[in-house]
């Protein structure tokens, strides 16, 4: 990918689901930091250390699963009582809150 970047075949290189240590290892091995890292991020999984690392290293974060992730059987954000209460009060769907 770095050769494609250097050869002007691509404008940027991105990764997905990498932690700070992985990003640093890639950067050290290739001399090039990824431009973006796509990660799961929502109010129940904020990942502040990773976000701080990426800000420091000018790596854009693209988030997925904004309503939460149910792989462990936990309620999604729009299933929380407080979210439902706010939605009902404002006449909108919980996912809109």
Image (tube, rainbow, N blue to C red):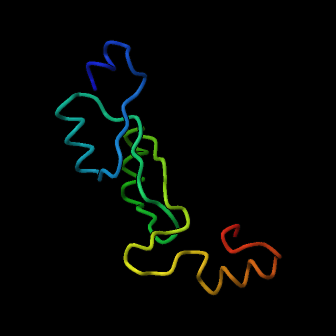
Residue 90 drawn above or below residue 60:
below
Residue 2 drawn above or below residue 52:
above
The answer to whether residue 46 is left or right of residue 80 is: left
Q: Residue at x 29, y 51 (%)?
A: 20
Q: Quadrant of the C terminus?
A: bottom right
Label total for image: 0
Residue 68 percent location from the top left of the image: 50, 69
Q: Residue at x 46, y 64 (%)?
A: 46
**Residue at the top extreme, as displayed:** 7
For residue 69, which quarter of the picture? bottom left
Residue 79 drawn above or below residue 9:
below
Residue 76 percent location from the top left of the image: 53, 75
Q: Residue at x 73, y 80 (%)?
A: 86
Between residue 65 and residue 45, name the one nearer to us.
Answer: 65
For residue 94, which quarter of the picture? bottom right
Residue 42 percent location from the top left of the image: 51, 64
């Amino acid at each position: 990918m770095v050769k494609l970047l250097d050869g002007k075949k691509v404008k940027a290189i991105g990764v997905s689901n990498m932690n700070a240590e992985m990003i640093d290892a890639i950067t050290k091995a290739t001399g090039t930091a990824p431009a973006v890292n796509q990660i799961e991020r929502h109010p129940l999984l904020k990942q502040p250390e990773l976000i701080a690392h990426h800000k420091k290293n000018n790596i854009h974060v693209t988030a997925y699963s904004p309503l939460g992730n149910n792989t462990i059987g936990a309620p999604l954000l729009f299933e929380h009582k407080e979210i439902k209460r706010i939605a009902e009060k404002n006449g909108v769907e919980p996912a809109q809150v």
